[in-house]
Amino acid sequence: MGKKTSWFTLSTTQCKEIENIGMRSGWKLLSQESLPSILPSDLRKKIDTAVMIAAPTSTGGTYLVYNNLRVDHKAGAIDQHPFALIAHSTGPSPSGMLIHHGKWKGRTTKPPKEFWDHVNESGVGNYFYTNPPSGLSSGTLDQLPEGHREAFERIITRIRSRPNRG
């Protein structure tokens, strides 16, 4: 299946939530509980952890990407589902984009047995937050873990190509 995108409109409350993030260039792991409220609740329940990536735009704003690690029980894998928006100097854009079923190296990974033990015992959520696969929980843009750099590039290219992108 090819890439599919969904666009979500931010409410006033969600815009305030994004404004209060305090974005700095780089990346960090986020727990399931720290995911933005704009993500649909049925998707949030399937996400173990996310990598939040912030990078400057050429116009003084910030690209903000949440590369969500969605648990696919049936396939026994973790799939990346990036969500992005642009935070302008005047505030966040009124909408954000989610990519489903992307195709890039590192988009789908097989987690270790310990992950499935955790899921069976505690449910989906926060395994990678407490056991970072790269050994890091934050870093510079140059230190993005495998697959996350490509997810970032793909979604930023797509969001920039949208007319009237907010």
Image (cartoon, rainbow, N blue to C red):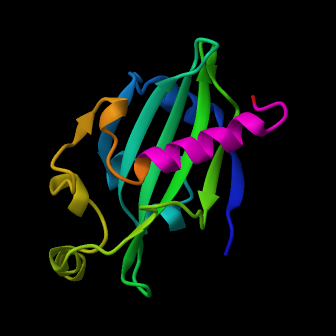
Q: Position of residue 142 (x, y in %)?
A: 34, 32
Q: What is the magenta range?
A: 149-165
**Which secondary structure dominates the residues rendered in magenta?**
helix
Please indicate, yes or no, whether residue 10 appears anywhere in the rendered image.
Answer: no
Q: Nearer the viewer, residue 124 or 102?
A: 102
For the image, the number of numbered tags is 0
- For this orientation, the residue located farthest to the bottom is 74
**Above-or-below relation of 80 to 110:** above
**Above-or-below relation of 29 to 127:** above
Identify the residue shown where x is 36% and y is 83%: 76
Name the image quarter holding residue 14. Answer: top right
**Above-or-below relation of 120 to 62:** below
**Above-or-below relation of 79 to 14:** below
Name the image quarter holding residue 5. Answer: bottom right
Query: Does 3 sit left or right of 33 as displayed?
Result: right
Please indicate, yes or no, whether residue 101 appears anywhere in the rendered image.
Answer: yes
- For this orientation, the residue located farthest to the front is 105
Quarter of the image where the C terminus is located = top right
Q: Position of residue 97 (x, y in %)?
A: 65, 47
Q: Position of residue 107 (x, y in %)?
A: 46, 63
101 is within the stretch colored magenta: no
Query: Does 14 sit left or right of 33 as displayed?
Result: right
Query: Does 46 sit left or right of 56 as displayed?
Result: left
Identify the residue shown where x is 39% and y is 83%: 73
Quarter of the image where the N terminus is located = bottom right
